[in-house]
């Protein structure tokens, strides 16, 4: 009997049901689209932000402060602490190893450059680094990384040096200062500054020959330096297998108050939650664990920008979702209120025959539940199509449907339908059958 009453309600009053279903379809479509984008926006934007470069800087814990004048580091090459290049593969063994997109070591050496035996030497910095290095990982695999990952905004005219070859690239500002240095030119570099004598010039000419293969523009101190394979800088400085700075590019989630807490003061449960979240602080902590004796600092210019934008975009998406749900609930409430008014006579007859308020409410709620299922199903399909379109326009690739959202959307549709029906149902419960049957 209960099912028959619900069925007859749909057959005799289809117009109101269609309006309620339409409101639920629109609300659930918007909710599905925004939730789908919200699930992908973090990873998508985080990967886009990696074009800003590395967001972590690793240095020896006991390293001395740099003494730079005009972009040139005047510390003696044997001063300060160094890190081992052989340990870098351990970065791909941490808990969030898949979030470590790349890392690049740097070793700065004060050098003198000569273009020929009789040319006067020019003092500058040689920066040893990786271009595209295959790094062995303890699990037996290899990982390819270098400046193309951690410093993607650097612009090269010509080509990058090959790792392990006697090649280099010249900073754009240095190339302008030293006329005649073009791709294909061979220069000689030495960590000793020569004088004006022919003997000094000859000594420098016996330094390491490097073929210039490109000119790099970085809009930073590297524009006044020579960039070469890390092995070259290690040999010149006398520190084979060592480096002084490490830039790491890692996918992270926006920082919040919890991420900034001291892990040593957390409870075991809080520590597990923090450790298992890709906060930049937890990834930095894990890097320090596999590279002991290091200091890992956040490059705030990059990390803060990522966190602010991700937080604002996520907040905007949640506001749109909540607004769509509220609008759908108001539409359901309006149509439900009208339905109750139209069916006052039916409610009065049921109550006169002994129907309780619970039974009357159950009939209306069963109708709303069926409408919620239908609206959620259609809304999920439309929302998935809308999410694909938004993904293509925003990120260049369509957003993939998330089937895990379907039960969430069903639940939201049921909540919206029930919430919108509460006030009309309360009014129906207060209806007195006597005046209704008398036509009052």
Image (tube, grey):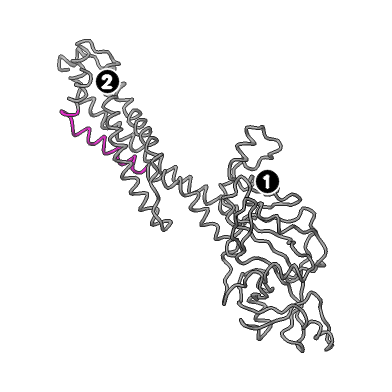
Residue named by callout 1 = 285
Residue occupying the point 55% across, 57% down: 50
Residue 393 image position (x, y, % from top left): 39, 57
Residue segment shown in magenta: 10-30
Residue 264 image position (x, y, % from top left): 71, 38
Q: Image height check: is 52 above or below 315?
A: below
Residue 54 is drawn in which quadrant? bottom right
Magenta-colored stretch includes residue 14? yes
**39 or 189, nearer to the observer:** 189
Residue 345 image position (x, y, % from top left): 17, 19
Q: Residues within 10 Å of mark 1 (few under 14, many from 20)?
A: some
Residue 436 is drawn in which quadrant? top left
Total numbered labels: 2
- Residue 428 is tagged as 2
Indicate the secondary structure of the residue bearing disc 2. Answer: helix
Residue occupying the point 32% across, 25% down: 423
> In 3D space, how far apart are the residues under numbered discs 2 and 1 (Cα atoms)?
60 Å
Name the image quarter holding the C terminus.
Answer: top left
């Amino acid at each position: 009997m209960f099912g028959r009453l619900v069925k007859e309600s749909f057959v005799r009053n289809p117009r109101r049901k269609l309006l309620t279903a339409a409101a639920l379809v629109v609300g659930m479509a918007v909710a599905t689209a925004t939730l789908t984008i919200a699930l992908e926006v973090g990873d998508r934007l985080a990967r886009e932000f990696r074009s800003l470069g590395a967001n972590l800087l690793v240095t020896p814990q006991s390293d001395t402060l740099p003494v730079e004048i005009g972009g040139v580091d005047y510390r003696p090459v044997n001063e300060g602490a160094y890190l081992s290049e052989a340990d870098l593969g351990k970065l791909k063994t941490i808990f969030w190893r898949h979030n470590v997109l790349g890392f690049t070591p740097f070793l700065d050496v004060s050098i003198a450059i000569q273009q020929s035996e009789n040319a006067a030497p020019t003092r500058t910095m040689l920066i040893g680094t990786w271009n595209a290095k295959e790094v062995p990982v303890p699990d037996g695999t290899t990982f390819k990384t270098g400046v193309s990952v951690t410093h993607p905004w650097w612009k090269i005219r010509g080509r990058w040096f090959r790792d392990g070859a006697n090649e280099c690239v010249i900073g754009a500002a240095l190339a302008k200062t030293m006329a005649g240095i073009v791709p294909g030119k061979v220069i000689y570099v030495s960590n000793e500054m020569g004088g004006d004598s022919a003997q000094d010039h000859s000594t420098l000419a016996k330094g390491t020959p490097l073929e210039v293969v490109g000119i790099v523009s970085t809009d930073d101190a590297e524009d006044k330096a020579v960039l070469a394979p890390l092995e070259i800088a290690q040999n010149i400085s006398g520190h084979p297998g060592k480096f002084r700075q490490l830039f790491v590019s890692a996918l992270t989630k926006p920082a919040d108050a919890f991420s900034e807490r001291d892990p040593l003061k957390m409870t075991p449960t809080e520590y597990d939650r923090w450790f298992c979240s890709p906060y930049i602080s937890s990834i930095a902590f894990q890097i320090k664990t596999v590279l002991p004796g290091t200091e890992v600092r956040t490059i705030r210019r990059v990390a803060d920008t990522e966190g602010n934008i991700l937080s604002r975009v996520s907040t905007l998406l949640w506001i749109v979702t909540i607004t769509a749900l509220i609008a759908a609930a108001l539409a359901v409430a309006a149509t439900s209120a009208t339905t109750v008014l139209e069916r006052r006579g039916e409610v009065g007859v049921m109550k006169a025959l002994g129907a309780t308020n619970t039974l009357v409410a159950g009939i209306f709620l069963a109708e709303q539940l069926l409408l919620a299922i239908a609206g959620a199903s259609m809304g999920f399909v439309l929302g998935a199509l809308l999410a694909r379109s938004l993904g293509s326009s925003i990120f260049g690739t369509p957003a993939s449907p998330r089937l895990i959202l379907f039960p969430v959307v069903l639940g939201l549709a049921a909540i919206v339908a029930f919430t919108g029906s509460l006030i009309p149902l309360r009014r129906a419960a207060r209806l007195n059958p006597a005046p209704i049957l008398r036509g009052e």
